[in-house]
Image: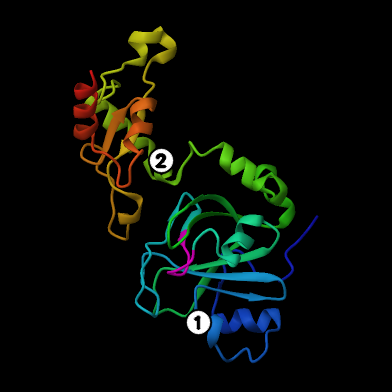
Amino acid sequence: MIILKYNFVIGETYTRKDVKTIIGAEDPHLTTGQWTTGYASFDGCYFLFANINSPGRTGHNYKNNLVDNDLYWFSKKKQTLKTKTIKNFLSGKYEVYAFTRTDSKNPNFMFHGLGFVKDYEDVQPAHLVWGFSKSLSNIPNEYRSKKRISYIEGVRRKTMITKYERNPAARKKCIEHYGASCLVCDMNFEEKYGKIGKDFIHVHHEVEISSIGKEYEIDPITDLKPVCPNCHAMLHKRKPAYSIGELTILIKENN
């Protein structure tokens, strides 16, 4: 069994100085340079320090979020997927020790485990979804380094935007209110395919992912709308996405 190089305990809290002491970094009582930023590198490993729903010391707040034990994380301001460090994260070849805190004034970060990239959004700053593992050997096979990029590219339908929509209670209330027909083209899968299409419908989130923050709560009536897969894809052909009304007009004009 492959274990972590450094002995951090999942669920325990550590200051940056604690981390430097445990890994044997030089001058552990000094937290300057890279150790004051969102991540630091040492001995071929990375140490990720994420503020959740709280601005960092510089005042920047990229709305990092924890959803179902996945970390939705933004990189440093000018970085993209082409930045060397972000490419290293995506490669899966480096141990990334993931720590989070909900109050930037609190020096303590909770350790979540070894981070591995489950998804990403090609924006600036780069936006990654981190999963957590207890050790290298426990990382799901599809996310290991050699298969990581091809796997992620193959499941882009499971995007970060739809991840936020996967609140079963909110989805249920949305469909109870609007029904299971597409609000754009009126497609109903049960009418088209019979019982195998019963209750099948996508749920579109009308709030852009970048606007999701600390006080965000899904309103299943105003924020979520039932749409068929085709219309869902067309809504996201533009950034920001088309509205339900805009796409409905485009269909009418085209017909």
Residue 12: x and y in percent read 57, 69
Number of disc labels: 2
Q: Quadrant of residue 153?
A: top right
**Mark 2 highlights which residue?**
162
Q: Amino acid at mark 2?
A: Thr
Quarter of the C terminus within the rendering: top left
| Residue 52 shows in this picture | yes
Quarter of the N terminus within the rendering: bottom right
If you read the primary sequence from the N terminus, does the residue marked by circle 2 or circle 1 appear first?
1
Q: Specify the label residue 36 is tagged with.
A: 1
Residue 60: x and y in percent read 36, 73
- Which region is colored magenta? 73-79
| Whole-number angstrom distance, CA of label 2 to CA of label 1 | 33 Å
Q: Is residue 175 left or right of residue 98?
A: left
Q: Is residue 181 above or below residue 63?
A: above
Nearer to us in this view, 117 or 112: 117
| Residue 133 shows in this picture | no
